[in-house]
Amino acid sequence: MQAEPGVSAALALERADRISALTYDLQLWVPEDASKSVEGRMVMRFALASAAAPLQIDFAQQAEDVVSVSAQNKSVSYQFSNEHIIVPVSALKPGENEISIIFRATQDAINRNPDFLFTLFVPDRARRAFPVLDQPDLKARYTLSLDTPATWVAMSNGPVQSDEVTDDRRVFRFAETDPIPSYLFSFVAGQFETVEREFRGRQMSLLHRETDKEKFARNIDAIFEAHADALDWLEDYTGIAYPFEKFGFALIPDFPYGGMEHVGAIQYRASSLLLEESPSQNQLLNRAQLIAHETAHMWFGNLVTMRWFDDVWTKEVFANFMADKIVNPQFPDTDHALNFLISHYPQAYGVDRSEGANPIRQQLDNLNLAGQMYGPIIYHKAPIMMRQLELLLGEQAFRDGLQSYLSRYAYANATWPALIEILDEKTDIDLASWSEVWVNTAGMPNFVLTQGPQDDGDDPQWALKQLDPAGASRQWPQQFSLLNLERDDEVDMLAAGEVHLPAELQSKPLQAVLFNANGLGYGRFPADLSLFNSWDSLSAVQRGVLLVSSFENLISPPYGSATQYFDILRPIVESESNELLIELAANQLHYVYFSLLNAQERSMRTASLETGLWETMLMQDSPSMTKLYFELFSGLALSDLALTRLHAIWTGEQSVEQLSLQEAEKIRLAEILAVRLPDRADSIIAKQRAQTENPDRRRRLDFISPALVKDPAVRDAFFESLKNPENRATEVWVSGALRRLNDPTRLDQAFAYLLPSLELLEDIQITGDIFFPSAWLNGALSAHTSLDAADTVRRFLKDRPNYNPQLEMKILQAADPLFRASALQSSSN
């Protein structure tokens, strides 16, 4: 029997129809030597509705890694084909079955580091670590026995049932889990410190490897409290008590994602939760949102799970949407409407404006392509869509619908249409049609002003009309407001097609009106740059809307003036008091400065920009704001004077009042200095390494150092080494190295990496985790601006007409800033 690689939709459907009451008893032996294979035994028990066909068990290793297979305690003559162990009909029976497999798995299947490991199985990586039915709608109960070196500790989904140390080995036995999908099964083990806390009556456990005790002490209480706040809020909102047996989390150095919601054993990137001294308000907010996001998954995704990964976005949208609600009470001084705008709109627009725009809900034929479902559309456009849906239904009806959804499908699986069916009962609106445009199609509308005569012959009237860039005449029903600047008055609008402006806005509408003033609408809205003259009279949200809309118009045909917009942004960055707005304007300024200005335009503005940021930094009255401006200054520094100042701060020869840099921040500064002071790169790297105490940060610096040096041959050799998947194992390191290789000051030499980076993408997709293809592309493409670079990307795709469509989509998304920068610069020449 020939099996198809991966897990096809057809195979998943066939197995889900036949199999129920699934459990796994998994025993794993982890060698102390990280170069040796993991050895294991998996016992799978299940009820089989029909034994008329063979059973394919997923295992993405080699045939020789299957040591033995038995069924019903008898040896089985099995086949191994295309990542599947095929159990014949003769070994199966209707009703209760037991299959036992002894196997070996490579260390990369469990993200092995020298003295710790962690598993990350989303969306289809469990089958690399052990034989499994790797699909989300076959939820199972897992029992794990983990045999590790004696000095290690461990965490998994279930509570520790026993912990025995004999000689140089330690064996953890974890209690059986609640029903969970394979992608949520997880364990962490290694040389970690363990912290146990009872917080508001909840028992929580934490693993970490941070060596800076002061840094850990500064953060630990806030981390536990944020989890407790999120759990309390979710229990109240959903009406369902925390649905699993235990709750814990592990802080992992250079974890590939911000976090991953494994049931009862959340994994986080350590630096996302252990913040440096004097964090900005935005950093504190981002940490709280990350914790709320992962905790919300315990209900949305873990309790109720999508049936197939075409609906993976449903768990992510609810986690993000709920996270925004959860953190509001924790940050009473934050403008949460502004935070929602800045957190979601720029990133959603960044994909939806591109040639590679994808719908929120995508078709998926095989689980081995599910990683490409992830991206800004599901994390950022979907919450915008969900907010519009909540506006349509009303908050209470929306909440009632979600409670019904969670209760009906608890510990089971559901689809987006099933939720729409529940919500449809609470409104007269045709939600299926509404969802068809918002969820099942890609792109966003362009709002344009039109003027036409009235039917009665009166004066022409201004109207705001939705245009579909795809030419499909779609309409996105949505709510937003218009601000009449002359009267300081907002008018609410419900737009579906063409809507006439109110009578009081018919005079000089473009100059007098801020469109989408409340930030609820989605699409490219008109924005005249003269509106910046009214900056001081606008609310924080209205300022954010003006920045977002103006930037979209700047980089869209017929394009705006980069120099004019730069000269608008600079004083905003230097004088605005709202941290969220400063960071939004600064991000735009960075792109305009390095990507849209030509070399002469940039050179003419370098000195004044650096001086302005430096002086603004010195005028701040808080350590967090001082650090915020220092980071802006260091990221934009190009002149000898600016780099000399940075070097003196890094060495300690110069100090800035209220500025204290911790180890990770000094490493980041050393990287910038090594790249932009190439003659001193070797000494900078050597000195920073000698001063780095944390072993995980030192290993990262050792890895990235060849990307920092002056010698192009060393950098070339380093890039060449990335063609070996083993050298890409720690993906966060690789992404950081790519950004340094492609620094804006190195683009002439870095151009040689562009085509090879694209050629490696298919292998990156096969060997990497879900976010790595996009991270790889962004690191390789984001700084380039030339027509030659844009042509290289276009030619690469043109020469491959049968290229993987999802990877083509990712390339077009990542290349959008490059395409627009090259087109805008060409239009201004």
Image (tube, rainbow, N blue to C red):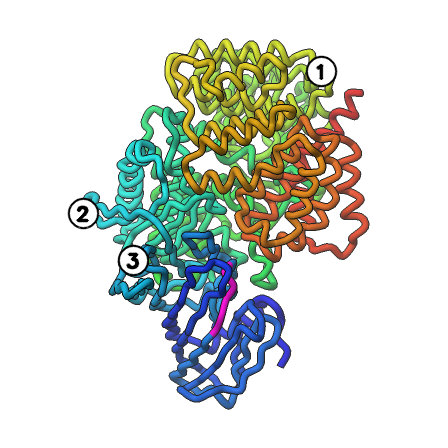
Q: Earlier in the sequence, mark 2 or mark 1?
A: 2
For the residue pair 382 and 813, the one nearer the viewer reads as 813
What residue is at 61 percent from the left and 54 percent from the top? Answer: 725
Q: Residues within 10 Å of mark 1 (few under 14, many from 20)?
A: few
| Distance Cα–Cα, label 1 vs label 3 | 58 Å
In the displayed structure, would residue 623 be above or below residue 525? above
Q: Which residue is mark 3?
A: 244
Specify whether 567 is left or right of 53. right
Amino acid at dot 1: Glu
Name the disc covering residue 201, or none. Answer: 2
Amino acid at dot 2: Gly
Q: Are marks 1 and 3 in contact (CB under 8 Å)?
A: no
Q: Earlier in the sequence, mark 1 or mark 3?
A: 3
Residue 366, picture quadrant: bottom right
Q: Is residue 188 magenta?
A: no
Amino acid at dot 3: Phe
In the displayed structure, would residue 304 be above or below residue 534? below
What residue is at 32 percent from the left and 55 percent from the top? Answer: 151
For the residue pair 371 and 526, the one nearer the viewer reads as 371
Magenta extent: 103-107
Secondary structure of the residue carrying numbered label 3: loop
Name the disc covering residue 433, or none. Answer: none
| Distance Cα–Cα, label 2 vs label 3 | 15 Å
Q: Is residue 652 visible?
A: yes
Q: Main secondary structure of the magenta part?
A: strand
For the residue pair 312 and 454, the one nearer the viewer reads as 312
Secondary structure of the residue carrying numbered label 2: loop
Name the disc covering residue 601, or none. Answer: 1
Q: Nearer the viewer, mark 1 or mark 3?
A: 1
| Distance Cα–Cα, label 2 vs label 1 | 60 Å
